[in-house]
Amino acid sequence: KAGVTQTPRYLIKTRGQQVTLSCSPISGHRSVSWYQQTPGQGLQFLFEYFSETQRNKGNFPGRFSGRQFSNSRSEMNVSTLELGDSALYLCASSSTSGRLNEQFFGPGTRLTVL
Amino acid sequence: AQSVTQLDSHVSVSEGTPVLLRCNYSSSYSPSLFWYVQHPNKGLQLLLKYTSAATLVKGINGFEAEFKKSETSFHLTKPSAHMSDAAEYFCVVSELISSGSARQLTFGSGTQLTVLP
C-alpha cells in the first residue's frame, strides 16, 4: 500500500503570496490532518478533515484553510504569506478520526517564505 | 485540557547502552498515548501506542513504553541503542474533545536522541 504523499516537497514563496499544498492519504483512509512544524513552536495541529467535513481546528488565523475532496485527498491553503509561515507542513491520514487510531504521516512540504 | 511534557530536549547515549526518553502527560479523560520518531527530513513514524489494554507496550525496532497512571508517565525505553536510532522522538496524547465527535492530538516538544559510537 502506498503511503501518504505530499506535493510539492519544497516550496519558496515571497511575503503576501498565497500557497496551496496537497496531500494524498493512504488508500481507504478517510481522515486527513495537517500540522505545522517549526523549531520554535514544535508540532502544532492545524485541522482535521473526515469525509469532506472539518472535524477539528487548531489555533491558527483564518489565513490558513483547508478542504477535503470526495476521494479523501486534501489541500491546505495559506493566503497572504508571512515570514513566520516558513515551516515544514505535515499531513497525516488515518482510517477513522477516533482517539485510538494512529496517524500515518507524509514526508512533509518544506515552505520557505522570503 | 491535555498536555504533554518531554522532560529532556536532548539525550546522548553510547551505542549498545540503554535508552530512556521521558514523557509525562496531563489528560482529563482516559488518553491514548503514542510515541513517534522523526528522522531528518522525513515524516513521523509510529513506534508504539497505548490504548488502555496492557500497560507495557512493545513497539517496532526493540522499543517499548510503560503506561503508569499513578505517575502520569509514558516513558520510552530500549535495552540497547543502535546508531540508526539517532532521531527526534515525540510523545503524543490523544483524547476526544468536549463535543465527543473528534479527537485532539497534542505533541510533546520532542527529544533529540544522539547515539555515540
Image (cartoon, coloured by chain):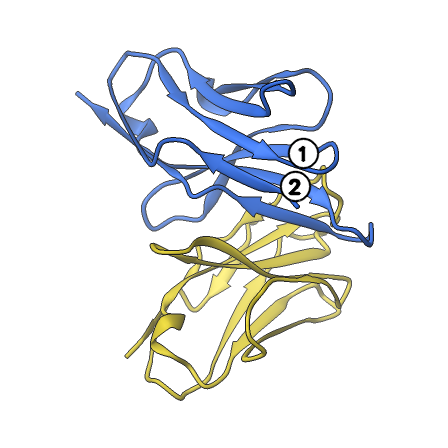
Chain colours: A yellow, B blue
Q: Quadrant of residue B2?
A: top right
Give the percent coordinates (x, y) of residue B68. Answer: 61, 18
Label 2 element class: strand
Give the percent coordinates (x, y) of residue B71. Answer: 58, 20
Quadrant assignment for the C terminus of chain B? top left
Dot 2 or dot 1: first in sequence order is: 1
What amino acid type is highlighted by mark number 2? Answer: Ser
Q: Could you tell me which residue is drawn at 43 percent across and 43 percent down?
A: B109
Label 1 element class: strand
Q: Which residue is mark 2?
A: B94
Looking at the rendered structure, the number of numbered marks drawn on it comes to: 2
Same chain shared by disc 2 and disc 1:
yes
Q: Residues at badges 2 and 1 in contact (C-beta under 8 Å)?
A: yes
Q: Could you tell me which residue is drawn at 41 percent across and 31 percent down?
A: B7
List the single residue furthest toward the bottom: A16
What amino acid type is highlighted by mark number 1? Answer: Ser
Q: To which chain does the residue with label 1 belong? A: B
- Near mark 2 (Cα within 10 A), the count class, few <14, some 14-19 or many ≥20, is many
Q: Quadrant of residue B39?
A: top left
Looking at the image, residue B47 sits to the left or right of residue B15; the answer is right
Q: Which residue is mark 1?
A: B32
Disc 2/disc 1 C-alpha distance (Å): 5 Å
List the single residue furthest toward the right: B100
Q: To which chain does the residue with label 2 belong? A: B
Give the percent coordinates (x, y) of residue A18. Answer: 46, 84
Looking at the image, residue A100 sits to the left or right of residue A92; the answer is right
Looking at the image, residue B13 sits to the left or right of residue B5; the answer is left
- Near mark 1 (Cα within 10 A), the count class, few <14, some 14-19 or many ≥20, is many
